[in-house]
Image (cartoon, rainbow, N blue to C red):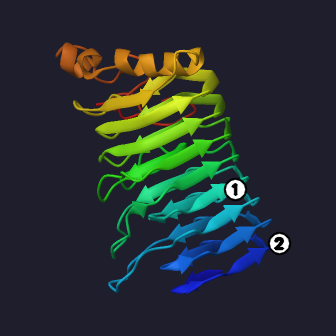
Amino acid sequence: MWFDGPFSGLTISNARIDSTLADGINFHRDITNSSVTQSLIRGTGDDGLAMWSASDNVPATGDSSDSFDHDTVQSPYLANGIAIYGGNGNSATNDVVTGSQYRGGGIMLDYENFGNTTVPFAGTTTISNDTINYTAGFGDQGIQQFGALMFWADSASISAPFTVSGDEIDNSQYAAISFDGGNPISTVAMNGVNISGAEFAFSNKVNTITGSASNVTAGGLTVGGMESCESKSHTTNLRFPDRDADAKSHANSAAAHTDANHPSDADPDADASVCPHGHPGDGDQRGRRGLRHLCG
């Protein structure tokens, strides 16, 4: 189902969509106060559910106050389970996303121009009480690895608020939560997030992240708490209250994994194929679970 705005007040409920060549449902350009609820999307060839705030070279304010709520997205074989591309005050809540395959993550929050300009994020985007299971794999065309929950700041920085709360992220093939795209990401507030099984709890591939995190726990990490070693100027500044020992340890691991510790910077004779946290880089393409890590 593809919907072109502008319009308002659309409700889709109890839909069943299976085995498509493209998106399951896409809210495209200036759709407001609309929702998808209690729907099952399975086996799509692009995003399972998407809000795409494209301008298409006409005046546009983007999708606004839309929601994906109590939906299930299973096994897209390309792209993301749920994607929100810019827009104002949209949400994905109480959803279940499982089994992303290639070039996609579980839930993607993306500021990127696709030919035409995408309207920047504004208002507060809410990602809450979702379950993301067995997502976050590998790709190409600029994104080498995907997070189960992924922030992608490609066209410019993302400064609008995000609320991430009550989410369960399990069995991620790469990072549970990743920040990518090269531009700063700020005003991310996380609360009550549980991570069970991933290579990393967090991955930072932008130059600055700011925000806060409380009651964030992670277990079953096969490599480490934080990956942050693809640039000389990456900074992670997520505030962890002292009482959240598990979450705070992940923040501290980011500080320990600075560029001064990267072998290509600290020692010109060091093996550049190995990151200080032990995962292979360009020199070793085997990786964990067959995924390639780019650390140099």
Spatial distance from mark 1 to mark 2, Cα to Cα? 19 Å
The picture places residue 50, in percent across and down from the top left corner, at 57, 67
Mark 2 and mark 1 in contact (Cβ < 8 Å)?
no
- Taking the spot 49% from the left edge, 80% from the top edge, the residue there is 30
The amino acid type of the residue labelled 1 equals Ser
Front position in the image: 77 or 57? 57
Q: What kind of element bears circle 1?
A: loop
Judging by the rendered image, the residue that carries numbered circle 1 is 75
Task: Find residue 244 and report its image quarter.
Answer: top right
Task: Find residue 141 and report its image quarter.
Answer: bottom left
Left or right placement of residue 46 versus residue 18 in this view: left
**Residue 14 disc label:** 2
Front position in the image: 287 or 257? 257
The amino acid type of the residue labelled 2 equals Asn
- Taking the spot 49% from the left edge, 55% from the top edge, the residue there is 109
Quadrant of the rendering where the N terminus is positioned: bottom right
- Taking the spot 80% from the left edge, 65% from the top edge, the residue there is 38
The picture places residue 190, in percent across and down from the top left corner, at 55, 37
Left or right placement of residue 41 versus residue 25 in this view: right
Left or right placement of residue 292 versus residue 82 in this view: left
The picture places residue 82, in percent across and down from the top left corner, at 60, 59
Mark 1 or mark 2: which comes first in sequence? 2
Vertical placement of 230 versus 163: above or below? above
- Taking the spot 48% from the left edge, 29% from the top edge, the residue there is 287
Question: Extreme left residue here?
Answer: 268
- For mark 1, does the 10 Å Cα neighbourhood hold few (<14), some (14 to 19), or many (20 or more) residues? many
Choose mark 1 or mark 2, whichever is in front.
Answer: 2
